Image (cartoon, coloured by chain):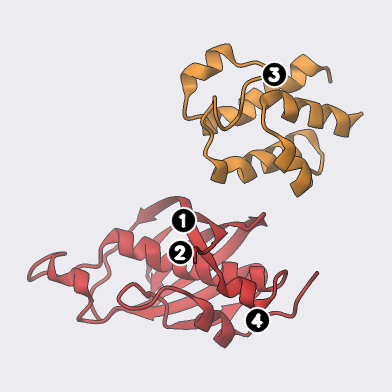
Amino acid sequence: MDQQEVFTKVVGILKPFVKAPEALATVSMETSVLKDLKVNSARLVDVVLEIEDTFGIAVTDAQADSVKTVGDAVNLILAAKA
Amino acid sequence: MTFGPLSLEDVLALVPQQRPFRFLDRIVSMNESHAVGEYTFRDDETFYQGHFPGNPVTPGVILIETMCQTGLVALGIYLLGLESPRDEVAQTVTLFTECEVEFERVVKPGDTVRVSAEKLYWRRRKLKSTVVLSLADGTSVAKGTVAGMGVRRDG
């Protein structure tokens, strides 16, 4: 699975939780999940669980805390799948 | 680190909500995956004065709160108690994050309701549960999913 494929899936996972849908039009690896997409921090657990199910990986709390941008999530997934 | 399970009496004592915003009289059963609680709506609950004058009906938001106090607050205390010392549990409150609930019947003053909750997930102090609210005779009143997150209380 290449970076673009993971990126597309991560954006799809985030989409139901995004409170600033206009930001999706310019979403990139540098887009902040909380600041730009305005995802409610209380929903991050749901995002992590969805990532675990979709990609068949386990995400520790420390790893989840390190994710600030869409790219952070993509890179975490790629590293776990490597 | 793990800790022994809190007793049902301990969990009930640690529920921070008190009258007139306490909607849990008794915990019937509880373990790592489910909780059952009961509450009897008193005739003198303050909200009956306005909802509705001369025709008291328990507000839906109060029924959601009732489901949350068993399915999120009490169950969350039990689950947190398995991984944290009691004083830390006592310093934690559960804040409501989201819910989806459907109502089928009304609840009147004097009715005893039972909340049956099943844990969907408990992760990073966020608890999501399915909840079913029923009358004492088993008649279903409401059901849905509720979620909340444990945070340290200020002060």
In 3D space, how far apart are the residues under numbered discs 4 and 3 (Cα atoms)?
A: 45 Å
Chain A, colour shown: orange
The answer to whether marks 4 and 1 sit on the same chain is: yes
In 3D space, how far apart are the residues under numbered discs 2 and 1 (Cα atoms)?
A: 8 Å
Camera-side mark, 4 or 2? 4
Instruction: Write the residue at 65% across / 69% down.
Output: B79
Q: Amino acid at mark 2?
A: Cys
Q: Are marks 4 and 3 in contact (CB under 8 Å)?
A: no
- Viewer-side residue, A49 vs B103: A49
Mark 4 — residue?
A: B6
Instruction: Write the residue at 45% across / 69% down.
Output: B69
In 3D space, how far apart are the residues under numbered discs 2 and 3 (Cα atoms)?
A: 38 Å
Mark 3 — residue?
A: A29
Mark 2 — residue?
A: B68
In 3D space, how far apart are the residues under numbered discs 4 and 2 (Cα atoms)?
A: 19 Å
Instruction: Write the residue at 72% across / 20% down.
Output: A7
Q: Quadrant of residue B107?
A: bottom left
Chain letter for red? Answer: B
- In the image: residue A43, left or right of residue A61: left
The secondary structure type at the circle numbered 3 is: loop
- In the image: residue A14, left or right of residue B24: right
Query: Relative to A38, is B120 above or below?
Result: below
Q: Are marks 2 and 1 in contact (CB under 8 Å)?
A: yes
The mark that comes first in sequence, 4 or 1, is 4
The secondary structure type at the circle numbered 1 is: strand
Mark 1 — residue?
A: B96
Q: Which disc number belongs to residue B114?
A: none
* Rendering coords of residue A76 (x, y %): 80, 32
- In the image: residue A68, left or right of residue B64: right
